[in-house]
Image: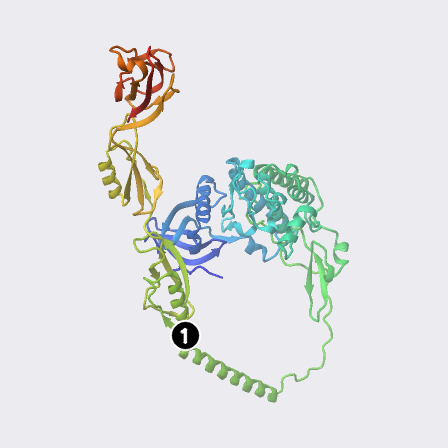
Amino acid sequence: MPYAPDLSGHALDDRYELHALIGEGAFGRVYQGRDRRLARPVAIKVIKPWWTEDPDWVASFEREAQLLARVSDPGIVQIFDVGHAPEGLYYVSELVDGENLASRLRRGALPPWQACGIAAQLCRGLAHAHAQRIVHRDVKPANILLSSRGRVKVGDFGVARLAEGTTDGAAATVVGTPKYMAPEQGRGRPTTPATDVYSVGVVFYEMLSGKPPFNEDSVVAMAVRHLQDPPPPLPAGVPAPLAAIVGRALAKDPARRYADGAEMADALVEARRSYSGRQRTGAPRSRSRATAHAPGPAGAPVGTRALVAPGGTATAVSTPAPVRRAAGLDDAPAGAPARTRDPGPPTPDATRPAPPAFPRRNVNPAARRRAIAALALAFALLTAMVAGSILLAGPVRTRVPKLTGLSRAAARARAHRGHLHALFATRYDAAPAGTVVAQHPGAGVVVKDGSTVWATVSRGLAPVPVPLVVQEASSEAQATMQGSGLKTAITYVAAPGITPGTVTRTFPRAGVSAPAHSTVTLFEAETPRWRPLTSFSGGRSTVFSIRGRQWRMVYTMAFHGTCTWIFFCSGPSAQVVNAATGSTVDSFGLNDGATRTTTVSSGPGEYEIRVKPGGDEARWSLQVEDYY
């Protein structure tokens, strides 16, 4: 499986230093870094190199940066910049000093009201995104950052979408983390702010109990549990108001959950306020002394400590319940660790007698001490020898071969022969497509055996937008295309009413990107000429359409019979009629002879010719020609 190279030590665009890798996601790596221009620490997310060939993933990366910029809020990780360096796409955001919630939960569950404060801050941050119709869709502990100042920040909107119902472009695509995924996500249905509420409910459940409600090895089994099974009960020590909030947030039906982050945050604040009010009105603060001692150290109840006396005897003593302030719900920042008042060391009720002393025996004789010392010395010598051999031999190293100028397959094979891994990115370049044009590390650099070489492969010249040359002279259009790196081919077309030699259209059309040095067809208006349109012999023609500014009738007529022998003959006559208006455009007599011509300058339109026979018999035929 390919893996992204560690870019620690690089500087993107000669501005953003990459100091150390601090996280990794499905298509990006996050580095702790520094902005040289503004002299401040930053976090930098760099897309993995093989995704640069996939336009969908590139669009997802750019959308993540745009969404982060839109939801500017103290509870959301802020974005500073976005760019495209030779090492890949990247964006720069604030660096949160602290840890993520996933790291904190590995140490166990949180105190209930501290978890309540973190959840309230989390909901407030999401509420700002929900107000702009943006759904996170991947709320999980790894994406929740706890700053050293007690602030909670939401990060990684990489799978977020505009919450617009059926217009969600990926409604049929299941995205998110199965362990924290709402039922509607598992079904591939459109997401809403209530989808994030469900995920927050899972995170809140995990903060209170130390583990998520469902934890299956199979993704399918996990989705089925979220779809069908109720969550297991929370631990007995969780306050009832918080358990009720978790229950509503984890409702299978989105309509039964809190509508969005703001409504859930208000519920958390109200739960804390109600609980604090009950505490002030005289709720019991600790159990009686007799009850506290009853179970003993193995099952000591809440409010007791186990003291181990000499000899292993344990004593349970009552301690006052710690006084907690509402983290993030009163005047303290939301999500801050719950403050406790140290009750001091426990005081036992009565002094117990020490256990009886046993006769002393020699458990470490001199012979045993000498044997242990000899074994320790031998082990130290062996360790030193192994360490020395490793230091002298050092790691196996190899010299990076030259990959530039090779094809992708040849470069991969050459790197493999040198015991190196080759990863490829692409870019537009003057070199032939498929040729390696750059590599890192460079040829000749000595690296560890098994290291990764990042090679950049040419995609050929960048596509060229076709210039707009319609209505230009053909010679000018050809010069424009040549200046843009494109070739031309001429196709002459009839274009009534357009000056000959003018470009009427192009293929591909203007604005479309064409491969560099490819051919664009110019459709050029040709010089007008007479074009046969229709012919007939009889009483009248069919209706015909004229496109040119003028047209003509070419006819042949000859008398026959007795008219041949007499001086005067009455021949046929023609009448030109506008078919739209019925008005007569022209009329003329058909004279005896062949290829006689009558020209009409009526311009474009629909016309009809009607021929009336004369007083003598005659043979005739007529052809209409258009001029364009």
Task: Tell me which amino acid carries mark 1.
Answer: Val
The x, y position of residue 362, in whole percent, is 66, 85
Q: Which residue is denoted by mark 1 in the rendering? A: 396
The x, y position of residue 427, in whole percent, is 36, 53
The x, y position of residue 600, in whole percent, is 27, 18
471 w.r.t. 189: above or below:
above
Asked which secondary structure carries label 1, the reply is loop
| Viewport quadrant of the C terminus | top left
Please tell me which residue is depicted at 52% across the width and 85% down the height of the picture. Answer: 378
User: In front: 440, or 564?
Assistant: 564
Residue reaching furthest to the bottom: 367
Classify residue 552 by image quadrant: top left
* Residue 477 visible to an observer of this rendering: yes
* For residue 170, side relative to residue 409 (left or right): right
User: In front: 238, or 575?
Assistant: 575
How many marks the image carries: the answer is 1
User: In front: 507, or 204?
Assistant: 507
Please rate how many residues cluster around mark 1, counting C-alpha atoms within 10 Å: few if below 14, some from 14 to 19, many from 20.
few
Q: Which coloring applies here?
A: rainbow
